[in-house]
Amino acid sequence: AQSVTQLGSHVSVSEGALVLLRCNYSSSVPPYLFWYVQYPNQGLQLLLKYTSAATLVKGINDFEAEFKKSETSFHLTKPSAHMSDAAEYFCAVSEGSGNTGKLIFGQGTTLQVKP
Amino acid sequence: EPEVTQTPSHQVTQMGQEVILRCVPISNHLYFYWYRQILGQKVEFLVSFYNNEISEKSEIFDDQFSVERPDGSNFTLKIRSTKLEDSAMYFCASSEFLSSASQYYEQFFGPGTRLTVL
């Protein structure tokens, strides 16, 4: 069965500092992996996705993530945090084959950016 | 740009009442999904729907829940007798096709309906 674990329910960084949000997954088949962002009282916005092409994936707003099969990880990074990055971030996994398309989400990580 | 829409944005209901949450998926999409997010918690899969049938449902999706595509454009989620614990944000999503090992099809999410059960 698929699962997603996000390490750290709350991450706090200073403006301009590196952002690192951790995600580990388990999947019995090669997965598709995603990071979504949710701003307060809003819906889900896709930040980036891994779909078995390049292992380093670039997304919107200078976010990127690296798929590491050996570590079953898909950590999200951004070189320099902005105040506007403060939001809830969800990692999600979907099976690449033999599936009904459902996404399995992690528990979420709240990113706080301090001035 | 095509988008998934959901109505209403906020629904307040009394415990025991029936509610219907409506979604209009992107017009050429064939696969439809409902997810929910209880306040402060993760997003959880409820059900997937294709060709007028449920493809998969989670343990949450019990007999109180049903889905329907009544007219070829709307996709609805009905909760027959709401409970306090049904209070959540409900997201609809759709995709053009089902992803395979060699081809990915993005799932597009609607803005959500916040359901409050009193």
Image (cartoon, coloured by chain):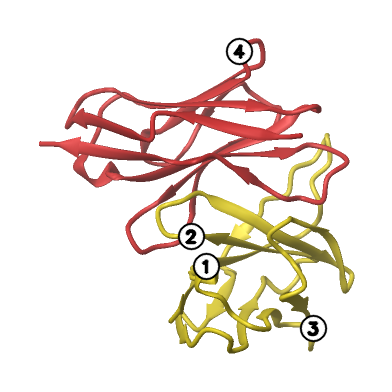
Could you say where residue B84 lies in the image, as x and y percent from the top left?
50, 73
Q: Can you see residue B112?
A: no
Q: Residues within 10 Å of mark 1 (few under 14, many from 20)?
A: few
Q: Of the residues shown, which amino acid type is indicated by label 3?
A: Gly
Q: Which chain is red?
A: A
Q: How many marks?
A: 4
Q: Which residue is mark 1?
A: B85
Residue annotated with mark 4: A71
Give the chain letter for yellow.
Answer: B
Residue A12 visible to an observer of this rendering: yes
**Which image quarter holds the C terminus of chain A?**
top left
Dot 4 falls on a residue whose secondary structure is loop
> Looking at the picture, do discs 4 and 1 lie on one chain?
no
- Whether residues under marks 1 and 2 lie with C-beta atoms below 8 angstroms apart, the answer is yes
Q: Quadrant of the N terminus of chain A?
A: top right
- In screen coordinates, is A49 left or right of B114? right
Query: Which is nearer the N-term, disc 3 or disc 2?
Result: 2
Q: Secondary structure at mark 1?
A: helix
Image vertical order of residue A65 relative to residue A89, above or below: above
Cα–Cα span, label 1 and label 2: 8 Å
